[in-house]
Image (tube, helix red, strand yellow):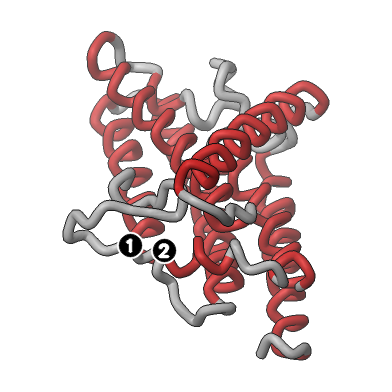
Amino acid sequence: MLLLLTIGGHAPEWGLGHDALVLVGLLALARFGVSLAAWDTAGAFGLMGAARDLMFSVFVEGLLLLVLVLLALPLHSTDLLSMSHAATLPEMWARPAHWAAALAFCLVIVAETGRQPVDNPDTHLELTMVHEGPLLEYAGRDLAYLQWAAAARHWIMLVLACELLIPHPGPFVAQLAVLAGGVLALSVALAVCETVQAKMRVLRVPLLLGSGAALCLLGLASWFAGSGG
């Protein structure tokens, strides 16, 4: 998945392409692999956490697709390089659709990285844990692999948000500096969000993500109602 991402508006040619929908599919495949890992241990807590994660994924992946649709509209392409180039256009932030995509993507980041109020990655309470559930029965090298996968997902979502939403014109070095600053700012924002927000009830998470989907639909309506369509 890391090979699909654009870095500073550029991406290596590895023969995989740079389609955003492929990236969504690989993220879903990775989640399925973690769920299989929980199933392999046959632990009750692991299966419970995996089941909750899969329930969240139905809403998270749908919301992510809506965000990508909004971001693909300016250049009519789901290619990550084209979408990254569209973020450099000066008129993007004047469009309500782009603001709707940015706000909805914030919810995607919180949910995909397992942060509060959606999840608490540090808890082992069986009544509330989601991300930690499938990892309970693992230790040593296997646990390190699973933790690395979670860190890679975290990195992917932050870089994707910066590349597709934050303007980054200029040469590659300047774009790289904007990317580093954006990732740092988003990391701080996540830390602040975790500090001021308590974890919400599991059944309220779909309502939160549904509000992001409604926001995306409003953004789509504004795009087609305005000059963007």
Q: Position of residue 60 (x, y in %)?
A: 55, 54
Residue named by callout 2: 81
Q: Is residue 99 above or below residue 1?
A: below
- Is the residue 36 above or below the residue 208 in the image? above
Q: Which residue is mark 1?
A: 18
Residue at the image position 68 percent from the left and 31 percent from the top: 190
Type of amino acid at the residue the image marks with label 2: Leu
For the C terminus, the quadrant is bottom right
- How far across and down, in percent of the image, does residue 215 sit? 75, 66
| Helix, strand or loop for disc 1 | loop
Q: Is residue 1 left or right of residue 89?
A: left
Q: Nearer the viewer, mark 1 or mark 2?
A: 2
Residue for point 61% across, 30% down: 184
Determine whether 85 is above or below 158 in the image: below
Label 1 is placed on what type of residue? His
Q: Is residue 103 visible?
A: yes
User: Mark 1 touching mark 2, by CB under 8 A?
Assistant: yes
Disc assigned to residue 64: none
Circle 2 packing at 10 Å, graded few (<14), some (14-19), many (20+), is many
Q: Earlier in the sequence, mark 1 or mark 2?
A: 1
- Going by the image, does 17 lie left or right of 72? left
